[in-house]
Amino acid sequence: MKIADVVCSAGRTGYYYDDLLAIRGGAVRDGFNYVGRPLTAGFARIRQPGESISVMLVLEDGQVAFGDCVSVQYSGTGGREPLFWAKDFLPVIERVVAPLLRGRELGSFRGLAGEIDALAAGGKRLHAAVRYGVSQALLDAVAKARRITMAEVIQDEYRIAGEMKRVPVLGQSGDDRYAGADKMILKGVDALPHGLINNVAEKLGFRGEILKEYVGWVRDRVLLLREDEAYSPVIHIDTYGTIGLAFNHDVERMADYLEDLAMAALPFRLRVEGPADMDGKTAQLRIYQELRHALKSRRGMVEIVVDEWCNTWEDIKQFVDGEAADMIHIKPPDLGGVNNLAKAILYCKKKGVGAYCGGTCNGTDRSAVVCTNIALACGADLCMAKPGMGFDEGYMIVHNEMNRVLALVNARNKTKISV
């Protein structure tokens, strides 16, 4: 099967680009908007609508495979690439990528994706968002050519043995962290509520008191609303470096506070993402190593998830090998090609580190579906409900795609056995 044509269209994402530096620095909310001066390069205002590009591969039999180029909500910070705008990158895809793919035979996904991932234009590697979207389309195209699911393509090409199983899902509440948590509990989500704790004064507290109260509230709501005592979700909170800011990056004080949070979460496990956000990867790696050591010398009740400054495949390998995390938030848009997502999940699992197939609320339904297939194939430890911050929509997309893929794979396996 060959690729007959490449067609692109600009689109919207499921959320917004936000200037994290400005928000963490105290930008004032005005309705859904933020008032103040942007601090991150490329931002014209603190909150701007996200943009996407759909890359559609028209196959010679008329089928259309596609993927979406998107970038993360907090673009331009934590070592990430700058903002992604459709008007800037549509011409790049049409000039550099499309001619390379037209007429190409759909052989190995890994080979094609690796070729795109290494592409450069003007002496510079293509923006990660472009590589991300094009590789999604290639995975979909290979799956359509072989008439199997994208998850089965990944299992086959990466030689992943064993039964494909459902991956636990993390819900994200956005700023509606109270109603959002209730929604997640009612739907029995595996990990919740994310919380979007990105401001010390309003959401964490200068002594961490606001977040501690909230964690206790989440625990109480689970105990009150759950229909089955067997339902025991992980309380997963993303703090965007605010714990480090509140405690002056004093590791011992941070560890003491995290232990207090874990006590407030009992009887449920606590997982804290991004407790510190330093000014570079070296400092980030060091503080996470020290923080994990400090927590082990206590009761070790908290799992630490690394996010900022752990973006590329090389970064992930460094944090895993440096024993700087209990779990890695693998952000597919930061990795470029989704072939790197598969590689990163499998490496984390091999080394005994939690593999969280995350992403961004600023993705699309398509990018979520493709990532879910890869999470299933590779046996990730956690998968984000995405896109958006409304929870229900993103959870529906990820949950239902998992169930569809598993149903198809199981039905195919039964047919093979019966034959």
Image (tube, rainbow, N blue to C red):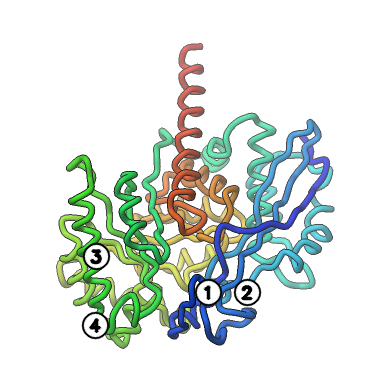
What separation in Å lies between label 2 and label 1 (alpha carbons)?
Answer: 21 Å
Observer-nearest of 356 and 15: 15
Whole-angstrom CA distance, mark 3 to mark 1, is 26 Å
Give the quadrant of residue 353.
Answer: bottom left
Q: For residue 215, which numbered disc appears in the image? A: 3
Q: Where is mark 1, residue-wise?
A: 33
Residue at the top extreme, as displayed? 419
Residue 352, image x and y in percent? 34, 55
**Residue at image x 73%, y 61%?**
119
Label 3, label 4: how far apart the Cα atoms are:
14 Å
**Kind of residue at badge 3:** Val
Assess disc 3: are there few (<14), some (14-19) or many (≥20) residues with their C-alpha within 10 Å of its C-alpha.
Answer: many
Marks 3 and 2 sit apart, C-alpha to C-alpha, by 33 Å
Give the mark toward the camera: 2 or 1: 1
Q: Check disc 1: other Cα within 10 Å, few if <14, some if 14-19, many if 20+.
A: few
- Asked whether residue 286 is in view, the answer is no
Q: In what element is the residue under mark 2?
A: loop
Does residue 322 appear to the left or right of 74 in the view shown?
A: left
Looking at the image, which is closer to me, 288 or 365? 365
Label 1 sits on a secondary structure element that is strand
Check whether the beta carbons of the residues at disc 3 and disc 1 lie within 8 A of each other: no
Residue for badge 2 = 82
Q: Amino acid at mark 4?
A: Arg
Q: Amino acid at mark 1?
A: Asn
**Relative to the observer, which residue lies in front, 117 or 41?**
41
State which quadrant residue 293 falls in: bottom left
Residue under label 4:
207
* 300 on left or right of 178: left
